Amino acid sequence: MSTPSGPASGLPVRMPRPRQSGRHRRPEPAVAPDNAPALVLAVPGTPGKETRALADEVTSIARSELPGLDARVGYLDSTETDPVQAEFPQLQAVLAHASEERFARREQARAAGAGIAADDGPVAVVVPLLAGPDSALLRRVRQAVNDSRAVAELTDVLGPHPLLAEALHVRLSEANLARADRARLFTVATAADGIILASVGGDEAVQAAGITGMLLAARLAVPVMAAALDQEGAIAATAEELRGSGATQLALAPYLVGPELDEGLLQAAAAEAACPTAEPLGSYPAIGKLVLSKYMAALGIAPAQPAGFPQR
């Protein structure tokens, strides 16, 4: 029987695990500030169940990295204007609703006699779900932000970034087109000796993809060349150039999250280049982390650091 001071004698006592100290101590997790703007993920492409599952997974990753985060999803090509009940709420409707909620909270605080500080910050930070700079899609996202009349900040796209090179490597290895482990140098009989990094968005997108492509080439120790899926003949010309330089087994690596990709375009490009293709980046964890990093950078929130380390 327990006593007021603890379990009866002879029973094991569960003691709390001491906190790890020193440089290997785990970082204290960052927490979203009070009344922080919403993170609104701007999702391109035709909405559907797969797209929604992808967006939900990306925002779930972001929430797990920053507890208390208000993360929402707005669809660029949706006509559903109810931001609460709609399955695929329109981006501008989501932003307008976030603005209305902010105004309502301020009015409630004013009615309650609470002191209200000046609030000139954005009601939302909009992060495009794009690996590269697709200028046409970004113009439409910016127009949706303007149409919502909400005070919102629009971030850059997710790449170039080393985490995207990691994600591309994983997708290629999942398709047995690259070795999965650089350290152990596992060999794969079907591994490609030349990679076509496929993007959409024209020349600017190809140039941005090329930066991540250099990081991917360093990981795989094979040549990587970027090419535009939406420019006629670009994929075939790149495949020919790689083969001319000695590559015999090519692979297509989509530098794309997925929703921005027109149906059938990737398969047609793979047939044009006469090579297999990996899957788009999708909900690889790095995507959610990059979305969150764009949000945190926009608000000046520092990432978590191990306790005891100096803040930079």
Image (cartoon, rainbow, N blue to C red):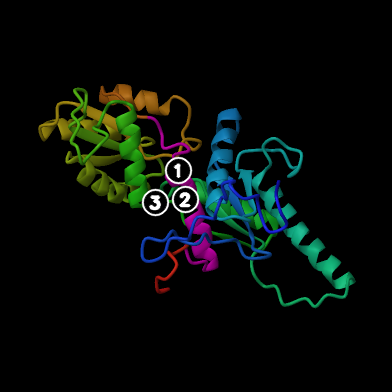
| Relative depth, front residue between 49 and 163 | 163
Name the side, left or right, on which 99 lies relative to 128.
Answer: right
Q: Nearer the viewer, residue 225 or 114?
A: 114
Q: Who's the residue at 53% across and 61% down the image?
A: 30
Residue type for callout 2: Lys
Q: Nearer the viewer, mark 3 or mark 2?
A: 2
Residue at (63% x, 45% y) in the render: 74
Q: Nearer the viewer, residue 228 or 280?
A: 280
Crowd band around label 3 with a 10 angstrom C-alpha radius: few (<14), some (14–19), many (20+): many
For label 1, the SS is: helix
Q: Which residue is mark 1?
A: 285
Label 3, label 2: how far apart the Cα atoms are: 12 Å
Q: Residues within 10 Å of mark 1 (few under 14, many from 20)?
A: some
Q: Is residue 228 above or below residue 243?
A: below
User: For mark 2, what is the residue?
Assistant: 289
Q: Which residue is mark 3?
A: 159
Disc 2 + disc 1, Cβ < 8 Å = yes
Q: Amino acid at mark 3?
A: Gly
Most common SS among magenta residues: helix
What's the amino acid at mark 1?
Answer: Pro
- Identify the magenta region: 279-303
| Residue at x 25% of width, y 32% of height | 178
Q: Is residue 258 visible?
A: yes
For residue 240, above or below residue 146? above
**Residue at the front extreme, as displayed:** 9
Lower position in the chain sequence, tag 3 or tag 1: 3
Foreground residue, 139 or 26?
26
Q: CA distance from mark 3 to mark 1?
A: 14 Å
Q: Which of the 4 image quarters holds residue 123?
A: bottom right
The stretch drawn in magenta includes residue 289: yes
The magenta stretch spans residue 211 = no
